[in-house]
Amino acid sequence: MARIAIATILVLILASAPLILAAVRGDNEHTAEDAVEVPDVIGMPREDAERILKETGLDLGEVRSEYSALVEQGRVISTEPSAGWPVVKGTPVNLVISAAPGTISIPDVSGKSAEEAQALLQSVGFAVEAVEEASESAPAGMCIRSEPPAGEQLQPGSSVRLVISSGRADGGGQASNLVACPTCGGAGRVGCPS
């Protein structure tokens, strides 16, 4: 992040250098008529941004693509120099355009705590929703599965549902590895062979 800030500052200094030098030297190579502000084209389609830069008297600089979960594909994420900065006409303005997002594989979160599963899914770019379901094999608070299942490919920002164990269905809290007696269902009736 610090590198980006330093690079942006350097670009702004370099872009403003002709105006500063003209003012210091007192020459008329660049007049006030040559000075323009970089227009705010963020969020605009690339074609509109290029047209506005040209109409302002600025040149199109480097155009690169970058994924953004917030900016629609094909629209401007940022400019270098930034909008509002004074520059000389003819200064190249770099554009960063939102690219089509790739897909992400859903990681396997079964057997993890609800907190671990949620953190893992969010760290790779998914929105998370949790629901509880009774389970005879997973302790309360443990992730049983995800919906869609692990390994499926989704767009970043897509919603993944975590199915979290609420414990046993009989209200016994923690799930158990014990199997209920087939005769009495685990009720412990007198005379039951278990």
Image (tube, rainbow, N blue to C red):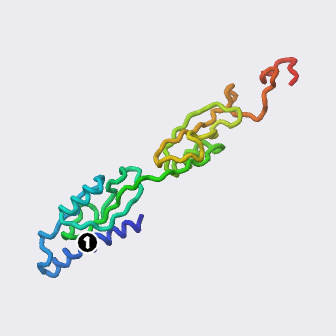
Q: Is residue 17 left or right of residue 160?
A: left
Percent x, y for residue 14? 28, 74
Above or below: residue 96 compared with residue 168: below
Percent x, y for residue 34? 14, 70
Relative depth, front residue between 174 and 72: 72
Quarter holding the C terminus is top right
Above or below: residue 58 compared with residue 187: below
Give the residue at mark 1: 15
Callout 1: SS: helix
Instruction: Specify the amino acid type for callout 1.
Output: Ala
Percent x, y for residue 59? 24, 67
Residue for point 26% across, 69% down = 92
Q: Does residue 118 appear anywhere in the picture? A: yes
Above or below: residue 30 compared with residue 103: below
Quarter holding the N terminus is bottom left
Residue for point 61% across, 32% down = 133
The quadrant in which residue 180 appears is top right
Residue for point 29% across, 53% down = 45
Relative depth, front residue between 108 and 172: 108
The quadrant in which residue 12 appears is bottom left
Percent x, y for residue 19? 19, 74
The crowd level at tag 1 (other Cα within 10 Å; few <14, some 14-19, many 20+) is: many
Q: Is residue 135 left or right of residue 86?
A: right
Residue for point 25% across, 57% down = 40
